[in-house]
Amino acid sequence: MKKKYLWIPKKFWAVLIVAALVIFGAWWFMSDKQSDVTAMHNTRDKMQVTASSYVVYDLARQIGGDQVALSLLVPPGTEPHHFEPTPGSIIGVQKADLLVYVSTTAEPWITDILQGAPGVRAVAAAAVEPGEDPHVWMTPYGALSMAKQIAAALQKADPVHKNYYQQNVKQFERTMSQLHKDFVAGLANCQHREIVHVGHLAFGALANTYGLQLQTLAGTSHQGEHSVYKLTNMVRFIRKSRVPAIFTEEMLSPELADTIAQETHVYILPLYTIEEVSKTDFEQGTSYQDFMRRNLANLQKGLKCQA
Ligand SMILES: [Zn+2]
């Protein structure tokens, strides 16, 4: 009897546990399914836009607003001129409604992507002739011309929201106009007009537009030659011109700039190319104009400009 008495509740508990597991499992399955369906529904309403590197990612975000679901091909913390796409990146592009890239000059690897996803709608925001400086966005009006290309592609792919995209371009145009005015005023009265830049030739258009000179060690891509001759000339120039600071790039390894700075007793300030992005800025959603204002502030400091 005792045994039987003990045996019954055991079975009872076993049944209870099984029942609880079944109920929990069913709830888990249902809730999981429901959230999947909701997520699919939300993203399916939006245009699926893939951007090659950060500058076009941010421009597409500002023009596309809440009508686009964006993804970025070159991951944060990666240099974009010599990025190597994976099969996964090609599959991602095949699924996209629109691929936005800078140009095949700035991103030669985009050719492989385009070949791997032949039917995909794609737009080069800043197509340049071979040999031309591909860093078109380094002036506010250059960025505006790219934003207009992206807007035109969005309107074509998603005509229902044409007015929305046009309004966003107008807003961006006002922002760029103000940014340009602030650069003109902010760089008008400077003790020095030479940007000594330990990096690649990304700021040529910016220097030209605002009447500055530019000294760099490398060419327009990141794999330039840092010749001893150029380095010696740079050190000589820093000593002679008495510039208080040299400029480097945010994502560049600091050794070379550190060596030059120690040799010449100047300090180092970063300039942002915006083609690549740190994980922190990516997570914070730092915009094109935010980066350009950092550039302006650092140029004013390093060239001793009066506001
Ligand atoms: Zn570059």
Image (cartoon, rainbow, N blue to C red):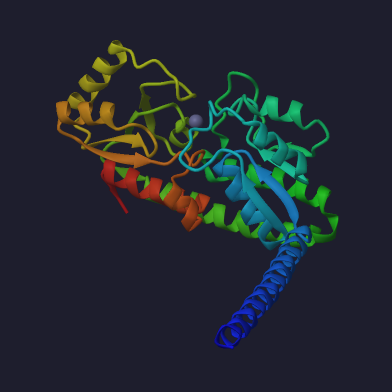
Instruction: Say whether residue 159 is left or right of residue 247.
Output: right
Between 106 and 36, the residue placed more toward the observer is 36
Q: Looking at the image, which residue is at 23% across and 31% down?
A: 258
The image quadrant of residue 41 is bottom right
Q: Which residue is painted at 83% across and 48% down in the image?
A: 156
Image coordinates of residue 69 in percent, x first then y, are: 68, 55
**Horizontal arrangement in the rendering, residue 280 relative to residue 31 (left or right):** left
Counting labels gives: 0
Q: Position of residue 24 (x, y in %)?
A: 66, 74
Q: Nearer the viewer, residue 211 or 150?
A: 150
Against 292, is 81 above or below? above
Regarding residue 303, the answer to whether it shows in the image is no
Up the image or down, 177 lies above or below 209; here it is below
Residue at 70% from the left image edge and 45% from the top image edge: 150
Q: Quadrant of residue 65?
A: bottom right
| Left or right: where 176 falls relative to 198 | right
As displayed, is residue 114 above or below residue 217? below
Q: Residue furthest front?
A: 1
Indicate left or right for 146 with 269 as reference.
Answer: right
From what the image shows, is residue 173 above or below residue 249? below
* Residue 100 in picture, x, y percent from top left: 68, 41
Q: Quadrant of the C terminus?
A: bottom left
Residue 103 visible within the image: yes
Q: Residue 108 or 215: which is nearer the viewer?
A: 108
43 or 31, which lies in front?
Answer: 31
| Residue 131 rendering spot, x and y as whole percentages | 58, 18
**Image quadrant for the N terminus?**
bottom right
